[in-house]
Amino acid sequence: MKKLKAFLFLFTFSTIAFSQIKEKFSANKQFVLASVEKHKAELIRLSNQVWEFAEPALLENQSAKVLSDYAEVQGFRVTRGVADMPTAFIAEFGSGKPIIGIMGEYDALPGLSQKAQPEKIKLKEDAAGHGCGHNMFSPGSLGAAIAIKELIETGKLKGTIRFYGTPAEEDVGGKIYMARNGLFNDLDVCLDWHPSYETAANMQSTQALIGYVLEFNGKSAHAAFDPWNGRSALDGAELFTAGINMLREHIKPTVRIHYVYKEAGNVPNVIPDRASVWFWIRDSKRDGVAAVEKRVFDIAKGAALMAGVDYKMNLVTGDYEILVNETGARTLQANLELMDSIQYTNEELAFAKQIMKNEGINYEGIRGNVKPFEQTKPDPEGGSSDVGDVSWVVPEISLNVTTAPYKAPWHSWIVVACGGMSIGHKGMLYAANGLGTTMVDLFENEKLRLEIKKEFNQRKGTEVWKALLPEGPPILPK
């Protein structure tokens, strides 16, 4: 009898919810929501698997496998190892135009291993963790792509849906290598989303970036017996970092420069003959990065001259800023505003409050509601993404969805913990619904696609995108 009552309650609840959905959404959009609900358990399982694998850039072998295998089981045509990256793949379904793309990431951050609990306890020692929520990124995007695939399969939509499995966003920018290989060129529109502490159609750009490893080569000698016979590569590296720190007084407030020493000698009593510095330069626009880049190159040359050593500048990667598309963002925002806010249980709210308290941060709740639409700020707050490069090749629509408490520090153990439990799962499924319903608009409305493309061309102007990459496949700096 209890089971029967429970069934009747769930049936009644589902009927009411479905009735409310019908009032808000078209039949095809209603289909998307039902598809995401149908695959919910599988998407959560995928997210948890990727969360547990926690594989850093270019090493996402297990993550790429479970994601691409799942796409293949769902009926997608899967091509693995694209753009000379073993962990990159493309999954597509359908034929002809329009071709709508959607992206997913799955690389973790070194040293951020964490259990899915509000106390700071590592899951594994010296392991990575998903401190940027990328474990949720691909399953959420795949959930939307599967819904569209099922609509195409049943003849309710026409065209091609294409999912991009994109590795190494945090370090070398896998999407840039894919873009350099022309893998986005035939798209009409591309979409992505990112875990956040707020939910909105993203109208903010990112910082452009360039990254190098600067190598100094000198001459070793005994640091006490005959140091005059040595030429310290470490002296060159330290003079270089001193120089760029002096430069900080003379750059615009929007510029960021940061670095780490990759190599600095082995023992104090040997003059180091090798040293290297991995550094990034960021600014709101690519031309601002280029201006600072020239100054930094002069500093490197001067440092080598002062230390009496040779130097070599090695390009690692470079991101363009995101080219915002307001027409596409407004379409996404309209769908979000028809959806209910993300609702949290008392247990989830207690988890969020405790985890912020344990990090010493004032708890301001979890913002499951949709933010009002906002215009693009002149300068982004910070951070870069290889999504920026895609946005200069094809019109790009981006979504942010809440997966952690408000003002949670990103790239932190808090994000790892929330991404491994229901707070993150709810955001991931919400993203699948928002992206899926928006893709219905893109497939159905040719005029909308043309308006999005028109704005893209206007914003891009005469700028010609060029991949800021070294030759060959991506390699992490050593």
Image: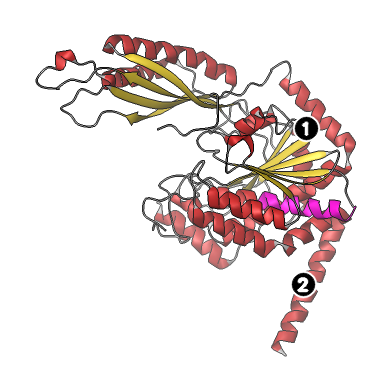
User: Residue drawn at (45%, 54%), measured in percent from left and top?
Assistant: 356
The 10 Å Cα crowd at callout 2, few under 14, some 14 to 19, many 20 or more, is few
**Residue 228 pos. (x, y %):** 15, 13
SS label for mark 1? loop
User: Residue drawn at (80%, 52%), measured in percent from left and top?
Assistant: 149
Provide the major secondary structure of the magenta segment: helix
The 10 Å Cα crowd at callout 1, few under 14, some 14 to 19, many 20 or more, is some
User: Residue drawn at (52%, 52%), measured in percent from left and top?
Assistant: 364
Q: Is residue 236 visible?
A: yes
Residue on which disc 2 sits: 13
Task: Please state the extent of the stretch shown in magenta in the rendering.
Answer: 140-155
Residue 186 numbered tag: 1
Q: Which amino acid does label 1 sit on?
A: Asp
User: Residue drawn at (82%, 60%), measured in percent from left and top?
Assistant: 21
Q: Which residue lies furthest to the bottom in this view?
A: 1
- Answer with left or right where residue 346 lies relative to residue 372: left
Relative vertical location of residue 271 with respect to residue 452 in this rendering, above or below: above
Looking at the image, is mark 1 or mark 2 nearer the viewer? 1
**Residue 346 pos. (x, y %):** 56, 67
Colour approach in the figure: secondary structure
**Residue 283 pos. (x, y %):** 53, 23
Residue 311 numbered tag: none
* Residue 85 is a magenta residue: no
